[in-house]
Image (tube, rainbow, N blue to C red):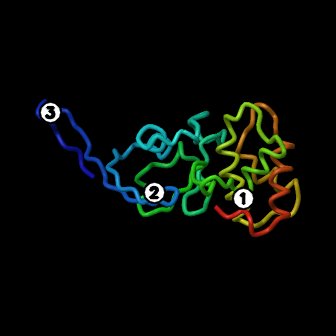
Amino acid sequence: MSALSNRTGVECYASHSIQFTLNGQQQALDVLPWTTLLDLLRERLDLIGSKKGCDHGQCGACTVLVNGKRVNACLTLAVMCDGATLTTVEGLASGDALHPLQAAFIKHDAFQCGYCTPGQLCSAVGLLAEGQIGSADDIRERMSGNLCRCGAYGNIVAAIEEVIQAPGEATP
């Protein structure tokens, strides 16, 4: 990419065309090179489930799945997702049927204010896909990138444990 000059001599940058699958739907957009995935999702695509918490990759409120892997959308440039498959919290349910983790979060009251819940859910889906969980301590360790200011950690772990015990139900 090279800088272009407009009539006033001020440099401007060309946008990049990207294509990706978002929650099962094909998307084709032009984005500026510095646009984060989080800003693209929230500001251009009106998917406001992923939250802007710290905007520094420290809280996990913006966690989404890119090709099935957990990423902090605030640290991921949208251009990095060209050709990727993205899943946000809005894409976890199938119509009116909640994802098993969503149902378990409700059952176990695994949220209080709800601000961190979308990131917690996406992170938990990614965690289950990784398949390396042996204990509640493993869950706590692998979910440590997702903070909950309300302190619902015990309930979050219980919800994830319940879904782990029902294999085959937790695919995104």
Identified at 60% across, 55% down, the residue is: 95
The numbered mark, 2 or 1, whose residue comes first in the sequence reads 2
Q: Amino acid at mark 3?
A: Gly
- Identify the secondary structure beneath mark 2: helix
Q: CA distance from mark 1 to mark 3?
A: 49 Å
- Identify the secondary structure beneath mark 1: helix
- Identify the secondary structure beneath mark 3: loop
Q: CA distance from mark 3 to mark 2?
A: 32 Å
Mark 1 neighbour class, 10 Å CA radius: few under 14, some 14 to 19, many 20 or more:
some
The x and y percentages for residue 19 are 38, 59
Residues at marks 1 and 3 touching, judged by CB atoms closer than 8 Å: no
Identified at 82% across, 40% down, the residue is: 109
- Foreground mark, 1 or 3, reads 1
Q: CA distance from mark 2 to mark 1?
A: 20 Å
The x and y percentages for residue 146 are 71, 43
Furthest residue toward front: 96
* Quarter of the image that includes the C terminus: bottom right
User: Quadrant of residue 153 in the image?
Assistant: top right
Identified at 77% across, 38% down, the residue is: 111
The numbered mark, 3 or 2, whose residue comes first in the sequence reads 3
The label on residue 166 is: none
User: Quadrant of residue 62 in the image?
Assistant: top right
Q: As drawn, is 153 to the left or to the right of 24?
A: right
The residue labelled by disc 3 is 9
Q: Nearer the viewer, residue 34 or 111?
A: 111
The numbered mark, 1 or 3, whose residue comes first in the sequence reads 3
Residues at marks 2 and 1 touching, judged by CB atoms closer than 8 Å: no
Q: Amino acid at mark 2?
A: Cys
Furthest residue toward bottom: 168
The label on residue 81 is: 2
The residue labelled by disc 1 is 127
Q: Amino acid at mark 1?
A: Leu
